[in-house]
């Protein structure tokens, strides 16, 4: 199986000028060994998020969220849609979160001075589950609090059309640092393609995360991701889409949040009309009346130029029922 090893997974931008590190065929499984968001800086609680100590933080924007790629997909052309199948994620032995002065929404808090007066790094150990591996393992938040490891890919995408965009704060229809917990094993991720070969990048795995990633970091970890890429020829989606086993999700990122929510919902309505036989009236009314329609707020942290990331989600059972009524 082809693989991008961790030592080579150190790209900090989505750049159409990069030479591919791998060339794969549609449906071919391959692996990317990823760094954590700090490229290995955080190992113990003594490693603080002090910018002057962190490698790459003398740059603007800082060198964070390293990526593996690009991966060249044979047969991919501008105007096609890339389909990303995440087959497996095996996380490292630990994850971390870092808070401190001027980091996140409480980085200047006077109500809780401990959050803004000093830097704090928490290290979470990972222990194997019944399988003997970390695939079904446990994250230890503290001596008392634990939960299942629920890994996902925080940053992925294809090379943008003309821009060179950093892996730290780059976001767009092509992907980027979106921190969507549904970019996980078993789901299909759809992305528009702008260059021959697609030029796909991936990195920034999280062992777990709460909605919005409120502090600006979550359970950051290194990992090995196994995946495969496929194509939908001659069609291009307007923005990232996600297909889960039981639902579909339209994604959009913008600031303020209400624009992200509205646009994700409009893109979902368009998806319902184009692919699932809904009339415009029925699709519009469905998202306002269906009790299982959901808005997911995946990322809403105050960090640089990051936009807020929303996903409009609806169960597939309503789509199949609509088709049966045709």
Image: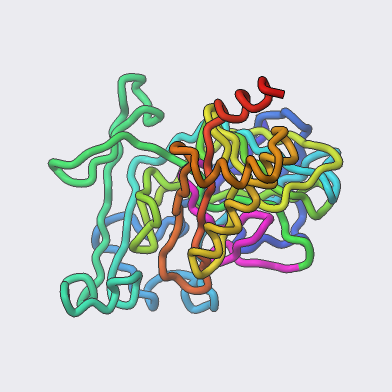
Residue 266 is situated, as x and y percent measured from the top left of the image, at: 63, 53
Residue 171 lies in what quarter of the image? bottom right
Identify which residue is drawn at 54% across, 27% down.
245
Predominant secondary structure in magenta? loop
Residue 51 is situated, as x and y percent measured from the top left of the image, at: 39, 75
Left or right relative to 168: residue 17: right
Residues rendered magenta in the picture: 163-182
Q: Can residue 68 be seen at all in this image of the molecule?
A: no
Q: How many numbered marks have been drawn onto this rendered protein structure?
A: 0
Identify which residue is drawn at 30% across, 38% down.
126
Magenta region includes residue 177: yes
Q: Can residue 145 be seen at all in this image of the molecule?
A: yes
Q: Is residue 112 above or below residue 317?
A: below
Identify which residue is drawn at 48% across, 53% down.
179
Nearer-the-camera pick, 231 or 133:
231
Magenta region includes residue 290: no
Judging from the image, the colouring scheme is rainbow
The quadrant in which the N terminus is found is top right
The quadrant in which the C terminus is found is top right
Left or right relative to 231: residue 210: left
Residue 178 is situated, as x and y percent measured from the top left of the image, at: 53, 55
Q: Is residue 223 above or below residue 258?
A: above
Nearer-the-camera pick, 225 or 262:
262
Identify which residue is drawn at 84% across, 38% down.
233
Residue 248 lies in what quarter of the image? top right
Residue 100 is situated, as x and y percent measured from the top left of the image, at: 28, 71
């Amino acid at each position: 199986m082809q693989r991008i090893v961790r030592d080579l997974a150190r790209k900090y931008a989505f750049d159409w000028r990069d030479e591919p590190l791998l060339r794969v065929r549609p449906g071919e499984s391959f692996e990317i060994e990823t760094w954590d968001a700090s490229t290995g800086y955080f190992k113990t609680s003594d490693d603080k998020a002090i910018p002057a100590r962190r490698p790459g933080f003398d740059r603007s924007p800082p060198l964070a969220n390293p990526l593996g790629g690009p991966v060249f997909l044979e047969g991919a052309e501008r105007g096609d849609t890339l389909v990303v199948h995440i087959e497996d994620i095996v996380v490292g032995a630990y994850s971390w979160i870092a808070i401190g002065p001027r980091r996140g929404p409480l980085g200047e808090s006077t109500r809780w001075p401990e959050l803004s007066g000093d830097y704090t790094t928490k290290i979470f150990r990972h222990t194997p589950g019944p399988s003997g591996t970390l695939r079904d393992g446990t994250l230890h938040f503290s001596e008392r609090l634990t939960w299942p490891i629920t890994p996902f890919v925080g940053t992925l995408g294809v090379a943008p059309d003309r821009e060179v965009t950093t892996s730290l704060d780059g976001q767009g229809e092509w992907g980027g640092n979106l921190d969507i917990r549904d970019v996980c094993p078993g789901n299909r991720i759809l992305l528009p393609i702008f260059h021959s070969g697609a030029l796909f990048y991936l990195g920034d795995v999280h062992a777990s995360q709460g909605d919005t990633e409120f502090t600006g970091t979550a359970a950051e970890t290194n990992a090995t991701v196994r995946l495969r890429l496929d194509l939908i020829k001659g069609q291009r989606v307007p923005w990232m889409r996600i297909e889960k086993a039981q639902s579909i999700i339209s994604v959009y990122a913008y600031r303020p949040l209400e624009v992200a929510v509205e646009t994700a919902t409009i893109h979902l309505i368009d998806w319902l009309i184009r692919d699932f036989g809904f009339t415009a009236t029925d699709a519009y009314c469905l998202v306002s009346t269906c009790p299982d329609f959901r808005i997911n707020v995946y990322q809403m942290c105050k960090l640089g130029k990051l936009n807020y990331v929303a996903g409009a989600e609806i169960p597939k059972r309503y789509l199949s029922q609509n088709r049966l009524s045709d």
